[in-house]
Image (cartoon, grey):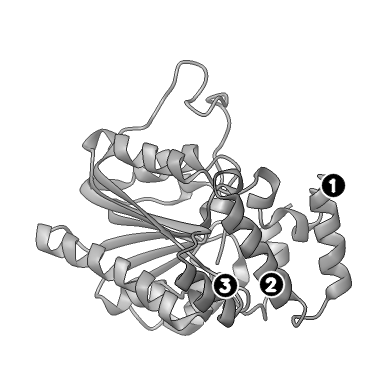
Amino acid sequence: MNAQEAYYRSGIDYRRGSPHLAQPALHDRLVEVLRASVHRLAEQGLPLRVLEIGAGHGGFTMQALALGCDVTAVDMSRSSIEELQRRFGTNPKLRALYVPDGELSHVDGDYSLLIFVSVLHHIPDYIAFLREASQRIVRGGSLLTLQDPILYSRHRAAHRAGLAAYFAWRLAQGSLIAGLQTRLRRMRGALDEANPRDMVEYHVVRNGVDEEAVLSFARGAFAEATLIPYWSSQLAVAQRLGERLGLHNSFGMVAHGCDSALSLPWRGPGLNESGLPDAVIIRFMCVV
């Protein structure tokens, strides 16, 4: 089952429930990170070719296009691709690709910037996927990830504060019974793989995303990498409060100076570095 196709159907508003899109000040800060990355690539003389994985309805696609980039936007949801075409289809710099199986073998070309916005937490083996996707970055290019939940166990206080804010926001969103049933299944660890509500947010299955593992990968593959921890909440008042308290429940990461060795297919002796057989096809499960 394509959980993204089932959940992110036509009519879904990506801004609802997405702090990086709904909270203006946070959105502006994250867009500034993207802008700085693009300007740096331009100063290096690299072609402004962007590959965005899990583009959704184009909240950051729009920003990359506005900066003059050629953007290949990839998504597993047909309705998302149709919305991208509706919004930006007259812009010759956009190439929107519907990839229902999530395989990057469908994506050709070399790119100076690889973007994941609110995506890694949807991917079961995100380090392996980062490794494969980064093979498409040209030498000296950059990687940018934004809006993923930090590893819960490493930041317990912030995680609990984030949960409290989420529940306060969730009470006003409707579908309370369905939401409560999903939460109870998650608390029991009894997730239904056939239910898009259970599987579309994969980070709840494994308790967040290991930001240190993401940073470690980037430091091994790029000349420099920087972690960007920050607070994000669907609830506006909680967003302001969390920022004042200096809490961090989300992160981004920016890396520059891609090692040219990444342009070669990675092969391991029987098992890849994530402990999976080489024969396993790495797929993304993402959008937003």
In the picture, measured across the screen, residue 252 lies left or right of residue 154, that is left
Q: Nearer the viewer, residue 215 or 96?
A: 215
The residue shown at (31%, 67%) is 34
The residue shown at (32%, 61%) is 50
Q: Give the mark nearer the N terminus: 1 vs 2.
A: 2
Q: Check disc 1 and give the amino acid type.
A: Arg
Locate residue 219, reporting x and y percent: 30, 39
Tell me the distance, in whole angstroms, between the alpha carbons under discs 3 and 1: 25 Å
Label 2, secondary structure: give it.
loop
State which mark lies toward you, 1 or 2: 1
State which mark lies toward you, 3 or 2: 3
Q: Give the mark nearer the N terminus: 3 vs 1.
A: 3
Q: Where residue 18 is drawn, which disc sits there?
A: 3
| Residue 194 visible in the picture | no
Q: Residue furthest top?
A: 269
Tell me the distance, in whole angstroms, between the alpha carbons under discs 3 and 2: 16 Å
The residue shown at (71%, 66%) is 7
Label 1, secondary structure: give it.
helix
In the picture, measured across the screen, residue 259 lies left or right of residue 188, that is left
Please rate how many residues cluster around mark 2, counting C-alpha atoms within 10 Å: few if below 14, some from 14 to 19, many from 20: few
Tag 1–tag 2 contact (CB < 8 Å):
no
Q: Which residue is mark 2?
A: 9
Q: Which residue is mark 1?
A: 188
Q: Residue furthest front?
A: 245
State which mark lies toward you, 3 or 1: 1
In the picture, measured across the screen, residue 174 lies left or right of residue 77, that is right
